[in-house]
Amino acid sequence: MPLDVEIPVLRGFLTPNEATEWKQNIFSIAEAGSLLELLMEGDFEAVLLSPLVLQLLTGDGSCSEGEDIEAYLEKRVLLYLTCGTNDDQTTRELAVMALAVSCLHMFAQSNWTGPSVSIHISDLLPQTLLSSQPQTLGDALHSSLLLDGESVYSLVANPFLLLLARVILTKCSSKMDSLQLLPWWTLRYISLHQQILEACSPQLCNLANSSMDKVLKCLSLFSEQRNLAIHFHLECVYTNLTYYDYEPAKEHIKKAQELSGLNINMTGALGKRTHFQQKYLAQLILEVKRKRDHSGQKDDEASPTPTPQASLPKDYNLGDDTVLDKINLAAPDQHELPDLSAEEQAVLLGVCIDFQKNNPVHKLTEEELLAFTACILSQPKFWAVEVTALCLRTKLEKGRSRCVERAMMQTQAIVDHFEDKNCPITERLKGFYFCQTPPRWDVQKQLASLLTDLGCTSSALIMYEQLELWEDVVICYERLGQHGKAEEIVRRELEKKETPSLYCLLGDILRSHQYYDQAWELSGRRSARAMRSKALLHLRSKEFQQCVDCFEQSLKINTMQLGVWFSLGCAYLALQGYEGAAKAFQRCVRLEPDNPEAWNNLSTAYIRLKQKNKAFRTLKEALKCNYEHWQIWENFIVVCTDIGDFAETIKAYHRLMELRENYKDIQILQILVRAVVDNLMDNQGKQAESLRSNLKELLGRVSSRHSSDCDIWQQYALLYGDGHSSNPEDNEKALQFLSKAHRCKVQAGGWEKEPALFKEVIKRAINMGEVTMSCCKKKSNPTEAFQVLSSTRLSLKSLATKAKQMHTDVATGQVHGELQDGVAALEQLLKELQELSGKLRDQSQAPSSKD
């Protein structure tokens, strides 16, 4: 029986068949029946105020002196679960489950969906317990919900409801063995609790993973409940994305899409975007079609019925005199959407959010996301889906001048709709848990942010103050140039109530460690924010050791602080603590796999630790995240060269030439040429000779861009055998490149006065002369050979003359000792060239004398 109850409760409604069965069998169950009936009707407050629940919570009104509320609730629930007989154990478990679910729904209503609901804790708990609390009731509840040093949002409504649900689902679940799907409700509790915390909680992350594993083991229990399985996979997607688990999120969204039977593709279609557009042009749209084998499987009974459109928030038209509200397609029939169910719309939304999280902030990404929202909003049916899609569209449109007015009106409409009584809570909760609708204060904050972007800073300031978002209040005062006012308002709030967050904020304003220390002590040394902010102040002052110590303390409290791991790694790099840096950046990329800077810095740490192969792998990951970052490519090419991956080095050189117009690295070219010429083995055990054609292509490209660099021509010649190849064509090319190298060197200047440099030029010139002789002897056309020889001879003669002019001792008449041998060899070569030139001239003239 429990499973027959659990599935409809998870789904949130009864099918007609279930309604009949429940009327006959379930609602009549002692204790649990009436609670389940109220729960399914959406009267959650009545569940909480029922005699059974009041008796469960208050008992005889006794409690221990100074007893903690959470401990008291745990004691009362466990007492209720264990005081009965085995015969009514399942009934008691169902009753407690109905209470937990009602608490979660009411908490969601209070902070996410609306309309507001107020409960009085004094009606639910003994007065002796409430009066014995060392703190105010609100502070006591917030302290119980604080996790991993991350504070709870100050204006969260009815936190007692979340605390009671938490006690039941995490502390008492071991006594509710007959409820196999209770971990699914734990997962839903986690989602709500995480959204009211300042940052991610490792405790909740671990609990979420164990809850998902438990539910996955039970998936076979509702194998026929396809839609319910979709719900679960979508909820897992959002949970995984919250805790940076991108790969599991991809698996879950893939599974949800498979179960839904939807084919979702970005495509182009002819259409018009403006009122004045004459021709149909290609427009980006989302194409959604059902797979054939799923077209007849749509189970209307097990899917929520749509909410009347009048009860949904108004979707504002753009109302622009140029841009149309939606794309006017040339052939709308060809791209008509199927009639989407709640699950199908939620799958579209899930794919959209997953796409957003896994792609960079870019104009093209925005266009693709807007295609998703346009598709979802074209069928307004469910409150949670509609609000989530409208909020996403607003975020995407707020930077567009033609859409910002609509964004403002739309956000205001969603804020106002929170208190609209026309849409009952049962309608608002349809799909709520598998859409991750933003909380009320997030939407209000979005509205204030829009006001700030439009320059209405004073209006935004009022909203931020009402929301008690003091950090944003301070930013507004800073923008208004009222720096003193920022400090004044924080001190005013501290007079009302001292909190670690406010002291941290005061420390941020005044850049003073003493306020972070006060926050740290006030929190009982549990404020991750206090140590985080103190560390950042040390970092700003370049006090790296103190910075590292504070970051480490903050991370002991909460390990899921992405920015802190990154900053810690940077501080370790500054201290040359490369092992610490590597560990910090490893954690960083584990939390955010698409962070190119973190991957790049991790590779820097590995390079310093002489772990070049690890550096190579991490840089490849960095380039996957950012293919345009030339600094990463520069690091990559150096590491590739060091480990001997010559193929990747060549590719990286090409990419750097695309990214930087004047990029040039002679040292890397020399290594590549030597590897190919000497036929070295690369890191894969392959011979570098196989890359000769690739390297020729690279050098051709490099030499065309840097045609006046003699070293590049020298390397190009070396690749072709430096004139000593068995292939005459290669020798011809090598001679061309050697000649260009000599010409570039002579024209560059700066070497004539330095004997050592002059000697090197002579050496290269002699090599060029010898190659010229070798090539000319093999040429079939004596006239052509004579011309080549003459050109080389003139170059060498000019060089010999310059050596005598600039480096001859006036007293002795002798050439400088370091150059004597070189000049003598050069003159000897000139004689040989003269002789060969004479022969070639005679050969070229011989045919004409016969005539």
Image (cartoon, rainbow, N blue to C red):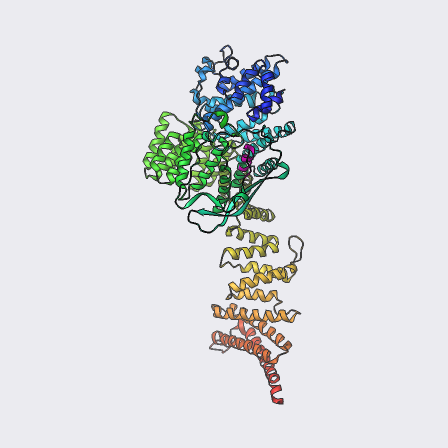
- The image shows residue 445 at horizontal and vertical percentages of 41, 34
Judging depth in this view, the residue of 316 and 460 nearest the camera is: 316
Magenta stretch, residue numbers:
337-348
- The image shows residue 440 at horizontal and vertical percentages of 44, 30
Quadrant housing the C terminus: bottom right
Above or below residue 713? Residue 791 is below
Quadrant housing the N terminus: top right
Judging depth in this view, the residue of 169 and 327 nearest the camera is: 327
Identify the residue shown where x is 64% and y is 53%. Answer: 683
Q: Residue 317 falls in which quadrant of the image?
A: top left
- The image shows residue 561 at horizontal and vertical percentages of 50, 36
Q: Judge from the rendering whether residue 231 lies leftward or rightward of residue 116; answer left or right.
A: right
Q: Residue 119 falls in which quadrant of the image?
A: top left
- The image shows residue 547 at horizontal and vertical percentages of 46, 38
Above or below residue 399? Residue 681 is below
Q: Judge from the rendering whether residue 97 lies leftward or rightward of residue 121; answer left or right.
A: right
Please state the total of marks drawn on the protein image: 0
Is 344 within the magenta? yes
